[in-house]
Image: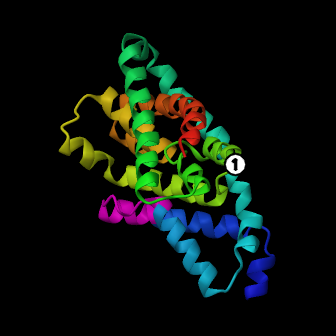
Amino acid sequence: MRNLLAESTFFGVLISIIGYEIGLFLRRKFKLAIFNPLLISIIFVIIVLLAFHVKYDSYNSGAKYLSYLLTPATICLAVPLYEQMELLKNNLKAILTGIISGVAASLGSILLFSLLFHFSHREYATLLPKSITTAIGMGVSEELGGIVTITVTVIIVTGVLGNIIAEKVCKIFRIKDPIAKGVAIGTAAHAIGTAKAMEMGEVEGAMSSLAIAVAGLITVVGASVFANFM
């Protein structure tokens, strides 16, 4: 059985999709944020690999085809933004200020914690791109000398947590404006957070989509500057 799974070309794709579908079912069934489909699929894949003693490389040989869809899926987020173009024009300064502030807070917090916990430069560079989408974050981490595989993990964890707590945080801090919600979620939790923003409303989803792209570009520049601080 183990050899059959390991040698199957699309084994990785199959269990990834099954895990995601289980997550969707649990989300619909219990309506709890903790049952995030991506989080559930990650846990499911880990359990299957451990149960059948399948090596990660064997799993990834098939699952890697799913990652090819990441870039076009991210680009498709431009569609809701285009539909809210007039709203963007009317609030451009406030939106850009919010995104820049969010990126500065992200990079600054990583610098602070790295100093407090005496991280090495490599560990510091690994965490800097935590709040941008994987497609951009991997390149930033590699360029700065970080550990790319850990960067990917941190990005996913950041996105999943953002997806789970986004609505609760907005309620706690009484953030009611849909533009502010979208900008905050997209800047802090990239594409995974944007999935939650789209559930909250069209405006939230559009602004979050914009925040992903702009925050990614600003982080590329900002991370290069902040990398010199350690």
Q: Classify 10 Å Cα crowding around label 1: few (below 14), some (14-19), many (20 and above).
A: some
Dominant secondary structure of the magenta stretch?
helix
Q: Is residue 141 above or below residue 2?
A: above
Task: Determine if residue 152 is in view.
Answer: no
Numbered range of the magenta stretch: 23-38
* Amino acid beneath label 1: Glu
Q: Secondary structure at mark 1?
A: helix
Residue wearing tag 1: 142
Instruction: Decide which of 26, 218 is in the foreground and name it.
Output: 218
**x, y percentage for residue 225?**
57, 34
Quadrant showing the N terminus: bottom right
**x, y percentage for residue 60?**
72, 66
**x, y percentage for residue 174?**
18, 37
Q: Residue at x 57, y 75 (%)?
A: 46
Q: Is residue 82 above or below residue 16?
A: above
**x, y percentage for residue 53?**
67, 86
Q: Is residue 142 above or below residue 154?
A: above
Instruction: Decide which of 211, 1 is in the foreground and name it.
Output: 211
Q: Is residue 136 above or below residue 58?
A: above
Q: Residue at x 39, y 39 (%)?
A: 185
